[in-house]
Amino acid sequence: MNNNSLSMSIFQPGLVSIMMPAYNAEKFIAQAIESVLHQTYSLWELIIINDGSTDHTAEILKSYTDSRIRVFHQPNSGEADARNNALTKINGEFLAFLDSDDQYAPTYLALMVSFLNQHPELDAVYCDGFYINSENKVLSSLSKFRRGPFMGDLFEQLVRASDVFGPPLTVMMRSSRILPLNISFDTRIVIGPDWDFFTRASQFIRYGYLDHKLCYYRIHQTNISLTAGSIKKTQSLILCRTKMLDLPRFHECSEETRYYVFYDLFVNLLHGDGNLINKLLTHPAFENLSPPYQNQLIRLAVLEGILNHLDHTPLYRKLLKNAVIKYPSDKKTRLVKFLLDINPMVLQTLLKVRQLLRSENKIYFPSGI
């Protein structure tokens, strides 16, 4: 069915469709399923996508005969593809998320549905919860590591960083509002497909917040965030960030938030990748920043680059030259250009010494150089 034709009438009122992607989930999936079976709210369907598991996940799933549990098998294609498969099978008025190693508290569905029923002006709601370990020991609240809480239009907050919801199991959405948007999970993203999904959706929907700890997010050695390689993690986060620049509402964000997106790219993620940095410098979103912000970002990108890629020195010199011409009063940029022109290796050595001193907390430097 074409999602553009979706309307409230095709969804079963009150039904919560819970998506659960599962890959080699034999250790914890039974606990996840049991947490749904023990809900005080009984009107739900659990859509499990077995993503080509090679362990005993399939056998465990066969042991559950409750008709509300719907199991589908697919060749291993990744978390995002499994979530997209689940999106095509939703029947419920509400959409919820539960990974195969996490758990709901018994009143999760009842309280989240009640909140949305009491607030018809809102399209989604998120709650608090707990981090737990492999033995179900509570480690801390989710909110301890989140900003907010926020309510209403959360687009700018989600653009700023991924620490608004935390794991997706804290979120419940109205299917009639999210599915017609034709937003899917990006299969290129290994780490953070939910952040990308929720950020794009937040351009069109409004959230409420329920101040209850209603779920359990498990930290263990097989979390994808721990097992995915560092290169894949970085590539995924770069893709999440660069996609934000092209969102129709990105220009509505404050300049501080827009600056922070580029800062995250140039300093934390690209590690001096001169070619991609040079490409991003011509992006309309970068050109819309004020000259002081542009020059600071160029300076920081070059400094990060000198630490990692001296072979890109000619490009860095060009970038600094243009920055000085465009904003000649920026003394810090002029200083970096001067040092780079004299001897790139000396500048790199100075930066490495500074980095070492910072890591040992022996001395603190102001931002920039």
Image (cartoon, rainbow, N blue to C red):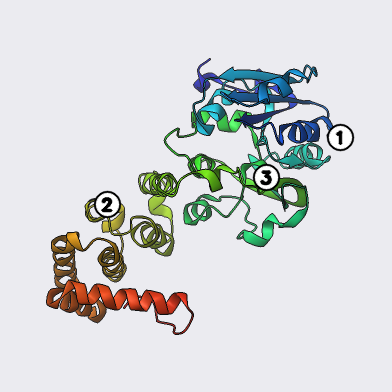
Image depth: mark 1 or mark 2 in front = 1
Query: Residue 218's spot in the image, x, y percent?
Result: 69, 46
Residue 122 shows up from this direction:
no
Question: Label 2's element?
Answer: helix
Q: How crowded is mark 2: few (under 14 residues within 10 Å), some or many (20 or more)?
A: few
The residue that disc 3 covers is: 170
Tell me, for residue 40, which label it has, or none. Answer: 1
Residue 314 % position (x, y): 13, 62
Q: Using the numbered discs, state the Cα–Cα distance from disc 3 to disc 1 in whole angstroms.
A: 17 Å
Q: Of the residues under marks 1 and 2, which one precedes in the sequence?
A: 1
Name which quarter of the figure residue 142 lies in: bottom right
- Label 3 element class: helix
Residue 273, compared with residue 342, is above or below; it is above
Instruction: Name the residue: 76% across, 20% down.
Output: 68
Residue farthest front in this picture = 55
Q: Which amino acid does label 3 sit on?
A: Thr
Cα separation between marks 3 and 2: 34 Å
User: On residue 284, which mark appears?
Assistant: 2
Can see residue 187?
yes
Q: In which quarter of the image is residue 35?
A: top right
Measure the alpha-carbon separation of dots 1 and 2.
51 Å
The secondary structure type at the circle numbered 1 is loop
With 193 as the anchor, is 289 left or right in this view?
left
Contact (Cβ within 8 Å) of mark 1 with mark 2: no
110 versus 293 height, above or below: above
Indicate the position of residue 303 as horizontal and vertical percent values. Answer: 28, 69
Q: Residue at x 33, y 73 (%)?
A: 352
